[in-house]
Image (cartoon, helix red, strand yellow):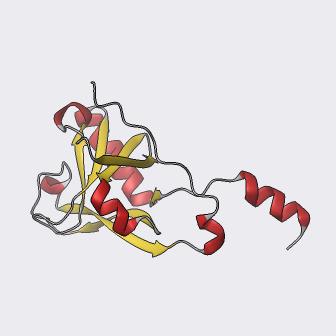
Amino acid sequence: MSTASLTETSTTLVARVSLTKAAEELIDNLRADNGELLFHQSGGCCDGSQPMCYPIKEFRIGMNDVCLGTIHGCNFYMSGDQFEYWKHTQLTIDVVKGRGASFSLEIPFGVRFITLSRLFTDEELEHLAPLIAIDNND
């Protein structure tokens, strides 16, 4: 690896969560109808570990939740206990056809968000973006 590559890598943070173009387009449509949104990675109820999309004012973030980052202007949360199991994986939010069994905003449209995951490489683990501080006083 060249010195230029090392320098570039050391200044670039690796996102903990990302999304596909299809997810980005769906978020645009949902935001147009519902205003600002947030995501919370479900911990096992209903559709298992499905990412859930809610209007920002209609979901209360828990004291033990962590914010992994922002996808297309939306904060992405999960419980701290669940994060302990998933902290070594990069999450990619995508969309598939099919009606899920949840309260997430996209369900009435016959699609649902899904979470794809992969393990971070050793190099990526050294350059992870930090978790975002949560203000639960809102």
Q: As drawn, is 17 to the left or to the right of 77?
A: right
Q: Quadrant of the C terminus?
A: top left
Write the residue at 43% across / 39% down.
73
Residue 115, compared with residue 17, is above or below; it is below
Residue 65 rendering spot, x and y as whole percentages: 29, 47
Write the residue at 58% across / 57% down.
128
Taking depth in this image into account, of 14 and 122 the one nearest to the observer is 122
Q: Quadrant of the N terminus?
A: bottom right
Residue 96, compared with residue 64, is above or below; it is below
Q: As drawn, is 78 to the left or to the right of 73?
A: left
Taking depth in this image into account, of 75 and 32 the one nearest to the observer is 75
Residue at the right extreme of this rendering:
3
Taking depth in this image into account, of 57 and 110 the one nearest to the observer is 57
Residue at the top extreme of this rendering:
138
Q: As drawn, is 40 to the left or to the right of 59?
A: right
Q: How many marks?
A: 0
Residue 2 rendering spot, x and y as whole percentages: 89, 69
